[in-house]
Image (cartoon, helix red, strand yellow):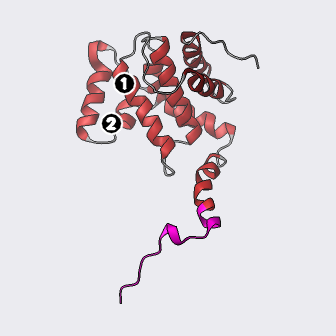
Amino acid sequence: MNRPQPSILDAPPAGIRSLLNDTAAEDQLWSDSDLQDVFAHQWKAPLAMDLGGLDDAFAQRVEMLASSKNLLLRSFGDLLTHERPPLPLLKLTKEFAKRCLNSPHSVVPHDVARVLYFASIAVALGRCRRRISTLSDDSIVDGIRWALSREWLAPEACDVLRSGLEALGREEEPS
């Protein structure tokens, strides 16, 4: 006998609320010390590993962009601190971070992904003088300021984020 599969539509409101709160609960699993370690690891993580993880063609494009003009951009840190980073790699980094943020099963904690997301936008604004986001200036500034308020953030990442505030003609709020 075929039994109908249960549907989320049949779940009581408390059950649905619980599902929606899972993402917020995930963010509470990580201590500042954990996030500092994960961010340091992600900062040094190979671009080809994370950005190229979707499919072979995508991986080849990332590798080509990362090594074009002898830039040798091997990690997120290399890309985000480079004086003239390739805009396509910044866009791919933003999309990678966005996918991590939207996935409840991401191996990258949401706070770390959120910092990478705003860092890629900040670098595009500050170093490339290009916009890679449809977010409003105020939303970008709010996101960058949120990222700068993370106690676990490395100084070089703070510099990257500040470049975005400067490009938007905003100053960092005093602590």
Instruction: Specify whether residue 74 is in view.
Output: no
Residue pictured at 27% horizontal, 12% vertical: 69
First-in-chain label (1 vs 2): 2
Q: Secondary structure at mark 1?
A: helix
Q: Nearer the viewer, mark 1 or mark 2?
A: 1
Of residues 67 and 164, the one drawn nearer to the viewer in this rendering: 164
Relative height, residue 78 to residue 19 (above, below): above
- Tell me which amino acid carries mark 2: Gly
User: Which class describes the residues within 10 Å of circle 1: few (<14), some (14-19), or many (20+)?
Assistant: many
- 40 part of magenta stretch: no
* Label annotation for residue 123: none
The answer to whether residue 157 is left or right of residue 58 is right
Does 127 sit above or below residue 75?
Answer: above
Residue 108 at x, y = what percent?
A: 51, 42
Q: Nearer the viewer, residue 169 or 51?
A: 169
In percent of the image, x 24 and y 39: which residue is there?
56
Dot 1 amino acid type: Leu
Label 1: which residue?
Answer: 89
Nearer to the camera, 135 or 33: 135
Residue 59 lies left or right of residue 109; in this view the side is left
Q: Position of residue 38 (x, y in %)?
A: 56, 37
Bounds of the magenta span?
1-16
Using a 10 Å C-alpha cutoff, classify the residue at mark 2 as few (fewer than 14 neighbours), some (14 to 19) or many (20 or more). some
Residue holding disc 2: 52
Asked if residue 45 shows in the view, the reply is: yes
The question of residue 14 being in magenta is answered with yes
Q: Position of residue 123 (x, y in %)?
A: 48, 17
Secondary structure under tag 2 reads loop
Of the 4 image quadrants, the one containing the C terminus is: top right
Q: Are marks 1 and 2 in contact (CB under 8 Å)?
A: no
Q: Residue at x 35, y 17 (%)?
A: 86
